[in-house]
Image (cartoon, grey):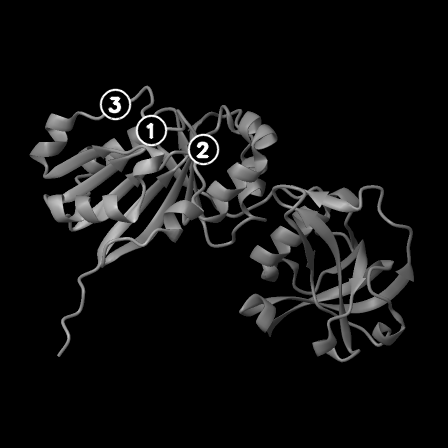
Amino acid sequence: MRKQEKEIPVFVFMGFLESGKTQFCRETLVDRDFTQGEPTLLLVTEEGVEEYDEDELNKRNISVVYLEEEDLNTEKLLDLQDEYKPTQVMIEYNGMWQLNKLFEIRVPKGWTIVQVITLIDSTTFTVYNNNMKSLMAEHIQNADMVVYNRCTEDTDINTMRMAVKPTTRRAQIVYENVNGQAQIDNGEIEIPYDLDADVVEIEDEDFGIFYIDASDNPEKYADKVVKFKGQVYCPPQYKGKAFVPGRFAMTCCAEDITFLGFKCVSMETPNLKDREWVTVTAKIKVEFYKEFDGEGPVLYAQKIEKAEKAKEEVVYF
């Protein structure tokens, strides 16, 4: 019988310089005793203000190796595996490097990336998100967990939540205050429309919020009647019995525009044309359909009207 390779879990910590990666790693390794004495290899790809106490880490069977970008290759990683023989690996990854580089390398046998954690300094989030949006989006879209640290009572939680939700639905969001106390995101988005109205009117600029909130919390919208403007998309698999009213949205950059919308059952579908603008009034039901890999919001049209295009044709997050 062929001997099965033992899995060596790899944990990746992403984030820009001074985002709190080193502090988070150090607390995980030392204060939380994450490794429990198992031989651990810590690969550090940038040096910030915070430093590691290598003597303290060595006492816990943790070896620290600093790498430049040119060192991040198969040969180097194989050498490190042979030298340190770790049972787990942690990588503090340089926030300015493309993460795909790490995924594309042929890593030593058994090495398996099991978790990617992205650290974001809430006090500099807006600056990085405005000036390095595509790189910020890459940090988020590959993450299993996003930790916003240095939060205060004045921190705009809703804006930070909306930076994650359109990019990835799987990532858990954690908010950590200046004292290190953490709170897991409750998933509640502040909505700018009245969900108790007889007809919930979604303004053009609020479509993105509506889409994210209804996707994450379909039961909240069950049996609600909504009215919004969108463009028509008629998937051939719906065979003229349904269409998708939605909006094109930019989640990170001009090259990353996607169409967001919900299935809408309507007898008027054969009369609709792709990309034409319509105002839809529809009742929401929660049903299973494969696009959601489970239950999600399905619209049942009550009224479809031709409409002028939105002032901003693309939704921004």
Disc on res. 46: 1
Where is residue 48? Give x, y as percent. Answer: 34, 22
The Cα–Cα distance between marks 1 and 3, rounded to whole angstroms, is 10 Å
Residue type at numbered disc 2: Met
Give the quadrant of residue 238: bottom right
Task: Estimate the x, y position of residue 55 in percent, counting from the top left.
Answer: 11, 26
Q: Secondary structure at mark 3?
A: loop
Helix, strand, or loop for circle 2? loop
Residue type, label 3? Glu
Q: Residue furthest left?
A: 59
Which residue matches tag 2? Answer: 96
First along the sequence among labels 1 and 3: 1
| x, y percent for residue 200 | 76, 53
**In the image, what residue occupies the spot 12% across and 28% down?**
56
Report which residue position mark 3 lands on: 51
Q: Are marks 3 and 2 in contact (CB under 8 Å)?
A: no
Q: Is residue 4 above or below residue 90?
A: below
From the image, state whether disc 1 or disc 3 is nearer to you. 1
The residue type indicated by label 1 comes to: Glu
